Amino acid sequence: GIGRVRSGGDGEGDSLERTRAELRAKNRMLDEIQLELTQVPFIDPVTGVWNRLQVLERLTSEWSRCERYGHPISVLLVDVEALGAVRATDGRETADRILKVVARRVKSIVRDHDIVGRYGDDAFVIVAVQSNDAGARQLAQRLRQGISGQPLVVDHEPTTISVRVGAATNS
């Protein structure tokens, strides 16, 4: 019949499909990098959680919404104790690694919609939306147990860390 004749057979079609697949993969990678770059100004570089400015901005927004609709909201401050001594004896890098592990533990304990950020050198802040005083107390207890109740593994070494947790709520 009538039609086009391709030279090279199926090899060109396979090559074209591989090239398209590579382009799709690279476009996905570029999209991920672009998303990360837009979040860089809002993320604490040491711990990977929100930075103080972003947490305060989100707290302001959530507080207004909770006040408007009559929902409770709680704010918890988690202070990692004796980290200054770790910095003095083992260095800033070790203290930073401890903070990373603590941040991961905090994120694993709180709900997905709660806001976690680094508030200061050795402190984290949690904005627990729709959490009343009883919920804040329960969360504080879970945080203390989850962080202080079992050793953190930093550089393959178990390290015991103590935390103090304070809370405030609008209910």
Image (cartoon, rainbow, N blue to C red):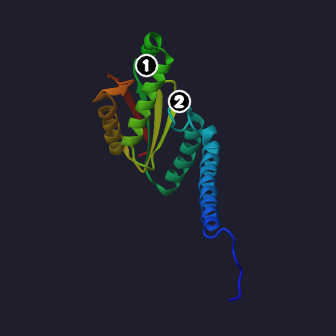
Residue at 35 percent across and 24 percent down: it is: 156
Residue at 42 percent across and 40 percent down: it is: 107
Location of residue 45 in the rendering, given as x and y in whole percent from the top left corner = 56, 32
Location of residue 103 in the rendering, given as x and y in whole percent from the top left corner = 44, 34
User: The residue under label 1 is which amino acid type?
Assistant: Leu
Give left or right: position of 99 versus 42: left
Location of residue 5 in the rendering, given as x and y in whole percent from the top left corner = 70, 78
Q: Nearer the viewer, residue 148 or 4?
A: 4
**Labels 2 & 1 near each other (Cβ < 8 A):** no
Q: Distance of mark 2 from mark 1, alpha carbons?
A: 14 Å
Determine crowd level at label 2: few under 14, some 14-19, many 20+ residues with C-alpha closer than 10 A: some
Q: Which residue is mark 2?
A: 46
Residue 154 sits in quarter: top left
Q: Which residue is mark 1?
A: 83
Q: Residue furthest top?
A: 89
Q: Is residue 84 above or below residue 2?
A: above
User: The residue under label 2 is which amino acid type?
Assistant: Val
**Quadrant into which the N terminus falls:** bottom right
Residue 40 sits in quarter: top right
Disc 2, SS: loop
Q: Nearer the viewer, residue 113 or 36?
A: 36
